[in-house]
Image (tube, helix red, strand yellow):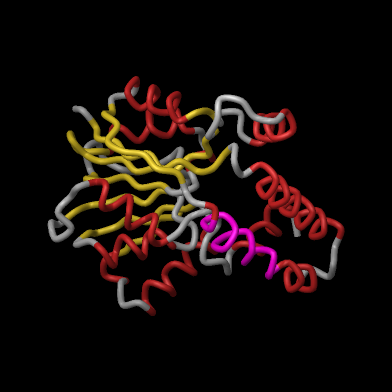
Amino acid sequence: MTDYQLLIDLHKDAERQGPGGNPETKLALDLLGIDKTAPLKIADIGCGTGASTLVLAEQLNAQITAVDFLPDFLEVLETRAKQKELSEKISTLCCSMENLPFNDAEFDVIWSEGAIYNIGFEKGIKDWHRYLKPGGLLVVSEITWLTNFRPLEIQKYWEVEYPEIDLASAKFALLEEHGYSPISYFILPEYCWLENYYQPMQARFQDFLKRNNHSENAHSIVEMETREIELYEQYKAYYSYGVYIARKLN
């Protein structure tokens, strides 16, 4: 297997492919201030195996287009939606978030948890703006510095992994620059990282290695993920995911 295939293999059976939590998805919904009984059209971009998609479908009277470029993840979402009797509310779309086949002003809400980094925060909010109706709502989570200064080790690590990491104030400025009015913001608590994402991943390591014959590449993946976990445990006071909620102005 290639490293790409190995990463899919490690993460496809996980409830989440990044930090997050059902209560946090519900909190973001509450902060939107929308009528949850009103018919809505929503795009969940970079949905993975659908943790947020399923919460949206349970909470709202909505038709949700769940977008991911990995068919393996979408198959898991479709199975979970069927088990929860939510299939009628969810349609899956396998494509890149850079090549979305949507019409202008098609959606009431665009949602993206832990995925916009794939194309970058600024490009994402700029490109997706056109797909929202006037007054439409945007909810995205983005890796964010929590302090203006941080230790050099973690600074260098994230500057390599994701150069767009920045303070929330910088993200708000980008939203305003690209035609949005910020509504609210909160950061994901520690358990969203450890209990909901990292610890379940660690519990899958041995089966993952066994499944892949303890190959050198599989061990490299585990070492890479372990390093990320160690850095979070050491430097969690300095960064988290910020959840940004904004309204399209026109």
Is 155 placed left or right of 138 in the picture?
right
- For the point 47% across and 53% down, which residue is it? 68
The image quadrant that residue 171 belongs to is top left
Depth check, front residue: 41 or 187: 187
Which quadrant is home to the C terminus?
A: top left
Is 248 placed left or right of 11 in the picture?
left
The image quadrant that residue 107 belongs to is top left
Check the image and report above or below for 156 versus 61.
above
Q: How many marks?
A: 0
Depth check, front residue: 80 or 243: 243
- For the point 21% across and 45% down, which residue is it? 108
Residue 12 place in picture, x, y as percent? 58, 64
Residue 142 place in picture, x, y as percent? 48, 40
- For the point 73% across and 67% down, which residue is it? 205
Depth check, front residue: 154 or 50: 154
Residue 46 place in picture, x, y as percent? 46, 50
Depth check, front residue: 8 or 207: 207
Tell me the magenta residue range: 191-204
Q: Is residue 200 magenta?
A: yes
Predominant SS of the magenta segment: helix
Which quadrant is home to the N terminus?
A: bottom right
Name, please, the residue furthest toward the top.
177
Residue 7 place in picture, x, y as percent? 67, 57
